[in-house]
Amino acid sequence: MSMWSTIELAGHDCEVFEPTQPSEHQYVIVYLHGVSGEWLNDKPVFTEQFERFGLRVIGPRTQRSWWSDRICDEFDTQKTAESFVKDDVMCHIQDHWGVTTPRVALLGTSMGGQGALRLSYKYPGLFPVVAAISPAIDYHLRMKQGIDETLPQMYDDPEVARQDSALLHIHPLNWPRHQFFCCDPVDSYWFEGVDRLQMKLYSLGVPHEYDFETSAGGHGFAYYNVQAQKAVEFLVERMEQERLRLPVA
């Protein structure tokens, strides 16, 4: 039977999904949650897609850390969310399931969507496949408006936060080979930042796929659920491409 469970990793909870029949090539998705911290174990639309493709899933819990490489006391006073994913989670995937890059992909929603993109832009060799649903690219705006309690603990001011956004971590010559992102066009708070990301990638000639046409109520799981199949299918297809990719001489 497929099932969700919770494990503790380096002192922090992670939700884990085990499919009834794991895929032949043992593909794994690392899911990065949004700022409100919703779990996927009660989201049947996502579970259906993971089961369909035999995907193992691990979803680390990092509170309102914004998946940054800055200390967020709400998550951990010694370890950043970025290092937790890059080191602890990836080591667990290798030790527990025997899987390494490129059979691991990143999937994120909202806060987790921008976190997934930023991780893949900073470490494209480790995370060459990424999908982001409604990524909250311009999270520094929350700091400007005083609606986030953790960001002022991590950044001196909104401009410092903006400089650490996914948009500013894109390297023109070193980027993830496979990236998909989407945002509801009526998502008035976050759409502008995602649109700016698409324009920058286009101007740099960086391959990417996006969907700015599908609309399903704005920002939240009503929209995430509609895009779940498209995002998961993209990840599976691209992990397969990476698996078959010939090594560079």
Image (tube, rainbow, N blue to C red):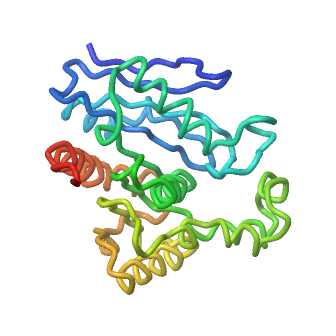
| Residue 115 drawn at (x, y percent) | 54, 54
| Residue 237 drawn at (x, y percent) | 18, 49
Up/down of 124 relative to 195, above or below: above
Residue nearest the viewer, comparing 68 with 172: 172
Q: Residue at x 58, y 72 (%)?
A: 168
| Residue 236 drawn at (x, y percent) | 22, 44
Up/down of 203 relative to 237, above or below: below
- In the image, 140: left or right of 55? right
Up/down of 242 relative to 39, above or below: below
- In the image, 20: left or right of 45? left
Up/down of 220 relative to 175, above or below: above
Res. 129 in view: yes
Residue nearest the viewer, comparing 169 with 225: 169
Residue lying at the far top of the rendered structure: 1
| Residue 226 drawn at (x, y percent) | 31, 54
How many numbered callouts? 0
Q: Residue at x 81, y 36 (%)?
A: 77
Q: Residue at x 55, y 34 (%)?
A: 87
Residue nearest the viewer, comparing 170 with 38: 170
Q: Residue at x 48, y 27 (%)?
A: 91
Residue lying at the far bottom of the rendered structure: 203
Res. 186 in view: no
In which quarter of the view is residue 1 placed?
top left
In which quarter of the view is residue 214 placed?
bottom left
